Amino acid sequence: MNAYGILAARYDDLMSDVSYPEWADRIERHFHRHGRPVHTVLDLACGTGTLSCLLAQRGYEVIGADSSAEMLAVAAEKAGRTCPPGNPIFLCQSMEELDLYGTVDACLCCLDSVNYLPGPKALRRMLRRVRLFLEPGGIFLFDINTPERLRSLDGQVFLDEREDLYCVWRASWSERRQTCFFGLDLFRRTGALWERGAGEWEEYAFKPAELEAELKQAGFKNVRQFGEGKLRPPRPSDGRILFRAEKPVIDSEG
């Protein structure tokens, strides 16, 4: 079962430790360092749209795309309460099947969403679609959980217990598949009763050097890596790496 269909209604509660304003600040720093104006932004795998809404509130024209209709329903309700009318707009699309009505100045794919692609073939499809819908000179930003971080989760069990919610998920690493499997059980209280849902997902352990090579093969240039939320090269201890790449101003593929 799709874990995000189960999680959608309580996803924001469970992600309360994520500082989305800090993410938005970090993204804007990269926009400024990029040196080209950014007006239109695609938030790919946008989930419940928190980052999309923050960027819309900061004056960007935002498109949020996600494959989960349940997550997008939460995003649309949130945008209706907190954002200018019609901004962001949300599309139910997977990363590999992205199909926009025009181009954007920047594309984001945050909070290790790229790890949810099932392997190199899906990654290549996604990179081709992103490149197609970026303006010449546009910027692509995404982050990953490193293979070392995913491998370190093997055998761990995580709990989140609240008055009306109990969530437990388990992690299992496969060296052969280079994936980390997550199993989820979510208990939600409705009145005097508890409702149980279950889901599962995998994160693929893309190697940073592999990602850099795939970006260049897909036609991106000026590919750079940054470590654990910093404007510096990654260190071996960093469990999360952010990539920044650009579509050439003169596009050889037209």
Image (cartoon, rainbow, N blue to C red):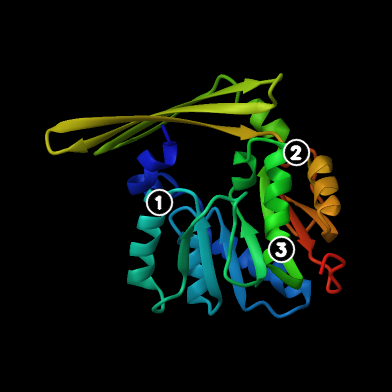
Tell me the number on the disc at residue 69: 1
SS at badge 2: loop
Residue 42 vertical placement versus 44 (above, below): below
Of the numbered discs 2 and 1, the one sitting upstream in the chain is 1
Q: How far apart in space, not on screen, are marks 2 and 3 (Cα)? A: 34 Å
Residue plotted at (65% across, 63% down): 107
Q: In the rendering, at what x and y percent does residue 70 appear? A: 37, 49
Residue 76 visible here: yes
Which residue bears the numbered disc 2? 237
Identity, as a three-letter code, of the amino acid under mark 1: Ala
Q: Residue at x 73, y 66 (%)?
A: 139
Q: Between marks 2 and 1, how big is the CA–CA gap?
A: 36 Å
Q: Nearer the viewer, residue 43 or 237?
A: 43
Q: Secondary structure at mark 1?
A: helix
**N-terminal label among 1 and 3:** 1
Amino acid type at mark 2: Ser
Looking at the rendered image, the disc whose residue lies closer to the viewer, 2 or 1, is 1
* Foreground label between 1 and 3: 3
Residue 250 figure quarter: bottom right
Vertical placement of 225 versus 205: above or below? below
Most foreground residue, 188 or 251:
251
- Judged left or right of residue 8, residue 134 is right
Which residue was labeled with disc 3?
A: 132
